Amino acid sequence: MNSRYDYGECEICTTPLEEKCVKQDFWLRGELIVVEGVPAGGCPQCGEKVVNADVGRRLATLMEDSERIAAATRILVPTLRFEEQEVSL
C-alpha cells in the first residue's frame, strides 16, 4: 500500500501511526457489520486505529446502504456472556 496520508501519532501512546488496511466493525440496529479493507492509521504499539475524514464519510455512506448490507456475506460470531462472579472485585 502506497502511503497517501500522514496519520500522525497515536493519541493514546504517541507512537507514529502506520497506514494499513483494517477490518472495522459497527453495530447497526442490533446487527454487527464488519467492513474489510478499510484504509486506516494503525498503532503498532497499542492497536488504536483511526481513519481520515474521506474514509469516515465513505463508511457512513456504506452503513446507509441497506441493499448492500442485506446482500453481504454473513459470518458466525461467538457470543459470550460476562459473568461478574468470574472477576474478583
Image (cartoon, grey):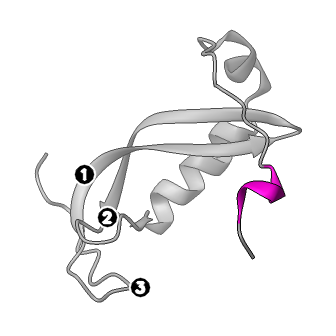
Residue sitting at 70 percent across and 22 percent down? 69
- Is 80 rendered above or below residue 45? above
Provide the residue designation for mark 1: 20
- Is 77 rendered above or below residue 2? above
Considering depth in this image, is 14 or 4 the residue closer to the camera? 14
CA separation, marks 1 and 2? 6 Å
Q: SS at mark 1?
A: strand
In magenta stretch: residue 4: no
Q: SS at mark 2?
A: strand
Considering depth in this image, is 15 or 18 the residue closer to the camera? 15
Provide the residue designation for mark 3: 12
Residue sitting at 14 percent across and 59 percent down? 3
Q: Are marks 1 and 2 in contact (CB under 8 Å)?
A: yes
Extent of the magenta region: 83-87
Provide the residue designation for mark 2: 41
- Upstream in sequence: badge 3 or badge 2: 3
Q: Are marks 3 and 2 in contact (CB under 8 Å)?
A: no
Write down the quadrant of residue 44 in the picture: bottom left
